[in-house]
Amino acid sequence: MSVFSGIKGFLKTAGALLASLAAAACVWVLHFSAFPEGDGNVWYLYSASSQAEIKEALSPGDLFRTTGESAVFFPDAGESAEELAKRLCDRYGAKILFSEEAGGTVSHYCYSPKLREGILLCGKKVNLHIAVRADSVALGTPVIFGGY
């Protein structure tokens, strides 16, 4: 075996590894959104609190600074917002931990094993916030920041 063939084999292996990493990165980016079917997605950067920077579009550098996301969903014809909220809760395998109502919005604070880590809220680990209004539902992970 010559030195040339050894280098050639190394370069082939390194090229295959880089191609695999690039493919894995593309898959990760395509599945980055927790709520890909939502409307008006916004992402929270740098902090999982109300101090987060809120962005409607992400740059590649933002992907590693993202700490949360929210999106709005609208019921299908003949479906109520409450029914939509239950369907979304089931989709994420979420368990409602506690709920509250304020200003015509019912907020359900949940835990879903399908989502990333959460925050402690009222002594419970919350990673999914479902806010139900008469005509729409907002989802947030770990919770919804800003107005809804």
Image (cartoon, grey):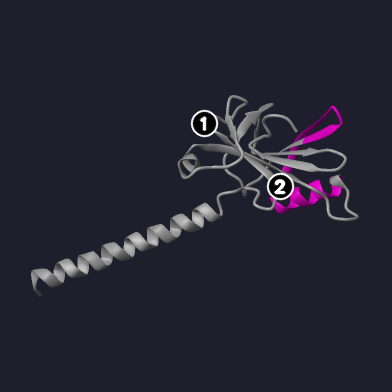
Where 114 falls versus 132 (above or below)?
below
| Type of amino acid under label 1 | Tyr
Vertical side of 19 occupied by 115: above or below:
above
Q: Quadrant of the N terminus?
A: bottom left
- Residue 97 image position (x, y, % from top left): 74, 37
- Residue 116 within the segment the image draws in magenta: no
Three-letter code for the amino acid on which mark 2 is drawn: Asp
Instruction: Name, please, the residue furthest toward the right.
Output: 78
Q: In the shown orientation, is residue 108 left or right of residue 70?
A: right
Left or right of 57? Residue 38 is right
Which sits in the foreground, 22 or 101? 22
Could you give the CA–CA distance between mark 2 and mark 1, rounded to whole angstroms?
Answer: 23 Å
Label 2–label 1 contact, CB within 8 A: no
Disc 1 is placed on an element classified as loop
Disc ID at residue 74: none
Q: Which residue is mark 1?
A: 46
Circle 2 crowding by C-alpha within 10 Å: few under 14, some 14–19, many from 20: few
Name the residue: 18% across, 69% down. Answer: 8
Find residue 39 and name its label. 2
Start-end of magenta stretch: 82-107
Specify which label sits upstream in the sequence, 2 or 1: 2
> From what the image shows, is residue 70 above or below residue 38?
above
> Residue at position x 66%, y 28% from top?
121
Report x, y in % for residue 29.
Answer: 51, 52
> Helix, strand, or loop for circle 2?
strand
Residue drawn 49% across the image and 37% down it: 65
94 part of magenta stretch: yes
- Is 66 in front, or is 1? 66
Q: Is residue 71 left or right of residue 116?
A: right
**Residue lying at 75% horizontally and 33% vertically, measured from the top left:** 148
Residue 87, percent across and down?
A: 79, 52
Residue located farthest toward the top when viewing the structure as drawn? 51
